[in-house]
Image (cartoon, rainbow, N blue to C red):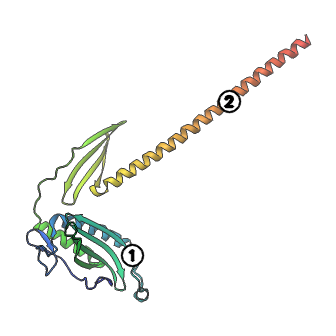
């Protein structure tokens, strides 16, 4: 499938020699667009995200209506990946022929030389699962075992009768953090991929600040209520004292 503004983009991908992923008919030399195995692994993970997003989309626009609207449509989902001097752009798009994933590569030739347009392929959205599975098989069959990644040491913290463990690990899908909640009677854990750590941290900080504001308002409200209660109690005591004084004066006049 081809995008209207990119010419013929129909193509596939194959694993080249030397642990690189190359475009059919192109070499993996300086003019070729070989993809390293580590990038191929990240592509595989991104493909999973695009597959999930595509599954949640509604029906495509009718072909006759899409053809009548002669204007480029925005991407349904976009991601990009930067590795060394190469950039890879992934766009889930739609035209009169249907939905497809366009993968485009550019190469930075160095200071003052700008970027050159690399390869572009378009994959029909209906075939993304098959392409992802084929890519995963190529990685499993031809991937070279890398040295264990250097990872930060785990840590833990105790809150009341719970203990939370933070352990960093890695597997063929990448680096992750396993957060475990441990009590004497049970243990629960979640796995957080490295690519969303910053988002998780930002979200925690955001809610921490919001809770601080909420708790501050609650303290101010309780303080105001307590002050009002004290004022009312003081007024009642003053009223009672004034009443007793008045009664005493009246009794003295009667005597």
Residue 24 x %, y %: 15, 80
Q: Which mark is residue 74?
A: 1
Residue 103 x %, y %: 26, 74
Q: Residue at x 22, y 55 (%)?
A: 175
Residue 244 x %, y %: 79, 18
Q: Nearer the viewer, residue 160 or 132?
A: 132
Q: Is residue 73 above or below residue 139?
A: below
Q: Is residue 61 above or below residue 160?
A: below
> Cα distance, mark 2 to mark 1?
64 Å
Neighbour tally class for label 1: few under 14, some 14-19, many 20 plus, Cα within 10 Å: few
Q: Residue at x 27, y 69 (%)?
A: 47
Q: Quadrant of residue 195?
A: bottom left
Disc 1, SS: loop
Quadrant in the picture for the N terminus: bottom left
Q: Residue at x 35, y 52 (%)?
A: 200
Q: Are marks 2 and 1 in contact (CB under 8 Å)?
A: no
Q: Nearer the viewer, residue 188 or 157?
A: 157
Neighbour tally class for label 2: few under 14, some 14-19, many 20 plus, Cα within 10 Å: few
Quadrant in the picture for the C terminus: top right
The residue at the far left in this view is 18
Q: Is residue 85 above or below residue 58?
A: above
**In the drawing, does residue 239 fall left or right of residue 209?**
right
Q: Is residue 10 above or below residue 179?
A: below
**In the drawing, does residue 24 fall left or right of residue 126?**
left
Q: Residue at x 14, y 70 (%)?
A: 138
Disc 2, SS: helix
Q: Quadrant of residue 87?
A: bottom left
Where is mark 2, residue-wise? 231
């Amino acid at each position: 499938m081809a995008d209207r503004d990119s010419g013929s983009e129909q193509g596939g991908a194959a694993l080249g020699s030397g642990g690189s992923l190359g475009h059919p008919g192109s070499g993996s030399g300086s003019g070729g667009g070989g993809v390293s195995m580590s990038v191929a692994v990240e592509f595989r993970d991104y493909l999973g995200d695009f597959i999930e997003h595509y599954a949640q989309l509604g029906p495509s626009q009718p072909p006759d209506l899409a053809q009548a609207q002669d204007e480029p449509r925005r991407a349904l989902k976009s991601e990009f990946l930067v590795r060394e001097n190469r950039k890879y752009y992934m766009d889930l798009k739609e035209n009169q022929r249907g939905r497809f994933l366009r993968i485009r590569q550019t190469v930075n030739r160095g200071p003052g030389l700008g970027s050159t347009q690399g390869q572009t392929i378009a994959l029909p959205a209906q075939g993304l699962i098959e392409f992802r599975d084929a890519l995963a098989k190529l990685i499993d069959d031809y991937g070279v075992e890398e040295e264990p990644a250097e990872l930060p040491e785990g840590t833990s913290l105790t809150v009341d009768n719970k203990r939370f463990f933070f352990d960093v690990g890695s597997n063929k899908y990448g680096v992750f953090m396993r957060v475990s909640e441990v009590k004497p009677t049970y243990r629960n854990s979640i796995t957080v991929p490295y690519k969303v750590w910053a988002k998780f941290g930002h979200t925690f900080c955001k809610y921490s600040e919001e809770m601080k504001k909420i708790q501050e308002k609650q303290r101010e409200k309780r303080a105001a209520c307590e002050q009002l209660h004290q004022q009312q109690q003081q007024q009642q005591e003053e009223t009672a004292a004034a009443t007793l004084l008045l009664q005493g004066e009246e009794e003295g006049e009667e005597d």
